[in-house]
């Protein structure tokens, strides 16, 4: 049986799940053989670092002014959207599906906008409403911009990792309502502005503001970017291969690798934690071992078991990124041993880190993209009535009020294609990295055998999780 996690509908697969898993694994393995045969040592530049093509747009004084004003208004718009999300949660409709902030934040901002960053680059680095507010405070108090102390190098991206995992916990277990979402946004705004003033705006927005880190990582896969030349007064639109940046860059900090693995692990956990298998693991398999602590009377034991279950869920959310890191690091160590590389395991783990990003995006898309159809479309009607007071500001209050329910079979096969495609791209990037890192084609090929096993395992795991039927949480 298969299942679409967005709808909770059970779908009978046209062929047994094992055939899908074998087929997906075979597709990834076959892609490895194809890349191993066709990619040679002199193909390490197959994907050039330079853009595939450029479009130069002359910028005169009038266009320059228009672009500056557009950028300013977009920054103001992002701040207004943050304020509207906060205000609508406190003052608007209590129905999560009828409140502007729930749809805008969870679906438009975290899904649609995230995918736009993956395609067109990290516009959030200048659209970030918290940075805009902090810069406004910096204009009033110049000392605020620089911060009270220098950001410690040892902290690296660890604050962003911790905040990201806290955010995922809120998303999964925080029973978010429109009001509580506004409270979280208000608290995060206060926290961000405090640390911007403490460490400096640029430092905190780079290392600690986890939304910026999240969008920056996704934008490593972008196909377009903008560059300006002040001397020639031209604006250049650069068109890249979608994996060009991944092949020619790498994170310099281990904490950024942990952030990537946390993105991967948290998405997998989100798909797993509400399935029948996961719920049964606690309430049926583990329950007998807890009876000495909670008693056998179900009426007395249930409240205690609920507390244990919450701890169980939270613990696994934190443990899973650690497990992913240990597994990844172990396979990189095997690559090093097989290739007899002089590079340390840590260095190699960073070199191959960005090869995981296509898998991260594939997992994210396959789990969440149906929400854009079912709930995201409602932003058109909610925009006209953000507080649910019966307004019709833009005349769209009655548009698309009913969700668009996609075909479950289509969902399953698109998820299959996304996950297999993401892993094939990752195998390709990892092979290119190996060719550039190791002394010979033979070393590169042998070194990638552990990575192939890892990619196949990720493929099978991802599809297996998506196929699990959903359960009813106790």
Image (spheres, rainbow, N blue to C red):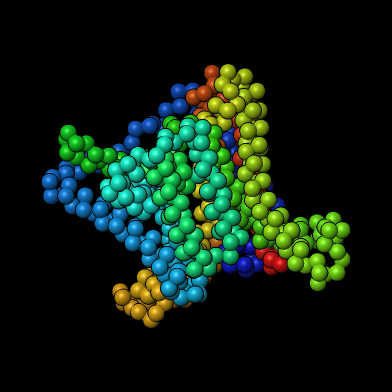
Residue 368 can be seen in this image: yes
| Observer-nearest of 348 and 252 | 252
Q: In which quarter of the image is the N terminus?
A: bottom right
Q: Which residue is drawn at 16% across and 49% down?
A: 65
The answer to whether residue 89 is left or right of residue 320 is left
| Observer-nearest of 136 and 141 | 141
Furthest toward the left, the residue is 61
Q: Horizontal and vertical percent for residue 275?
A: 68, 61
Q: Residue at x 61, y 22 (%)?
A: 339
Residue 127 can be seen in this image: no
Q: Horizontal and vertical percent for residue 286?
A: 80, 56
Question: Dividing the picture into quarters, in which one does residue 31 lie?
Answer: top right
Q: Is residue 76 above or below residue 160?
A: below
| Observer-nearest of 441 and 101 | 101
Q: Which residue is drawn at 16% across and 35% down?
A: 232
Tally of marks: 0
The answer to whether residue 443 is left or right of residue 199 is right
Q: Horizontal and vertical percent for residue 456?
A: 63, 41
Furthest toward the bottom, the residue is 390
Q: Is residue 297 above or below residue 433?
A: below
The answer to whether residue 248 is left or right of residue 334 is left
Q: In which quarter of the image is the C terminus?
A: bottom right
Q: Which residue is drawn at 57% across and 31% down?
A: 349
């Amino acid at each position: 049986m298969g299942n679409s996690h967005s709808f909770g509908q059970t779908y009978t697969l046209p062929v047994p799940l094992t055939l899908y898993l074998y087929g997906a694994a075979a597709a990834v393995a076959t892609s490895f053989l194809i890349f191993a045969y066709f990619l040679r040592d002199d193909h390490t530049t197959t994907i050039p670092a330079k853009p595939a093509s450029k479009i130069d747009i002359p910028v005169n004084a009038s266009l320059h002014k228009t672009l500056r004003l557009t950028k300013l208004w977009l920054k103001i718009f992002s701040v207004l959207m943050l304020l509207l999300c906060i205000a609508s949660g406190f003052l608007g409709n209590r129905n999560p599906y009828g409140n502007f902030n729930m749809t805008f934040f969870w679906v438009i901002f975290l899904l649609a906008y995230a995918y736009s960053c993956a395609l067109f680059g990290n516009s959030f680095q200048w659209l970030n409403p918290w940075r805009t507010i902090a810069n406004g405070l910096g204009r009033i108090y110049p000392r605020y911009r620089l911060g009270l102390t220098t950001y410690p190098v040892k902290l690296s991206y660890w604050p962003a990792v911790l905040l990201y995992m806290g955010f995922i916990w809120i998303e999964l277990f925080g029973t978010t309502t429109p009001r509580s979402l506004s409270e979280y946004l208000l608290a995060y705004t206060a926290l961000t502005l405090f640390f911007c003033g403490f460490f400096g705006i640029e430092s905190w927005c780079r290392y600690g503001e986890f939304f910026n880190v999240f969008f920056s990582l996704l934008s490593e896969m972008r196909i377009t970017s903008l560059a300006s030349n002040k001397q020639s007064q031209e604006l250049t639109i650069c068109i890249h291969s979608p994996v060009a940046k991944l092949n020619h860059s790498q994170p310099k900090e281990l904490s950024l690798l942990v952030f990537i693995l946390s993105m991967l692990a948290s998405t997998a956990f989100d798909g797993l934690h509400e399935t029948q298998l996961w719920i049964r693991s606690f309430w049926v398999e583990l329950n007998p071992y807890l009876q000495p602590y909670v008693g056998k009377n179900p009426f007395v034991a249930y409240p205690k078991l609920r507390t244990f279950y919450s701890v169980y869920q939270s613990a696994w959310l934190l443990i899973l990124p650690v497990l992913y890191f240990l597994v990844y690091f172990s396979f990189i160590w095997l690559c090093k041993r097989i290739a007899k590389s002089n590079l340390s395991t840590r260095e190699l783990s960073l070199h191959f880190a960005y090869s995981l990003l296509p898998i991260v995006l594939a997992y994210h898309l396959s789990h969440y993209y149906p929400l854009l159809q079912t709930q995201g479309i409602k932003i058109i009607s909610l925009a006209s009535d953000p507080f649910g007071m019966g307004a019709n500001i833009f005349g769209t209050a009655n548009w698309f009020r009913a969700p668009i329910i996609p075909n479950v079979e289509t969902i399953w096969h698109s998820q299959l294609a996304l996950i297999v495609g993401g892993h094939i791209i990752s195998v390709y990037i990892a092979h290119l990295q190996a060719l550039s890192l190791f002394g010979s084609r033979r070393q590169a090929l042998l070194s990638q055998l552990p990575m192939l096993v890892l990619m196949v395992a990720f493929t099978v795991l991802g599809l297996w999780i998506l196929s699990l039927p959903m359960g009813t949480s106790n």
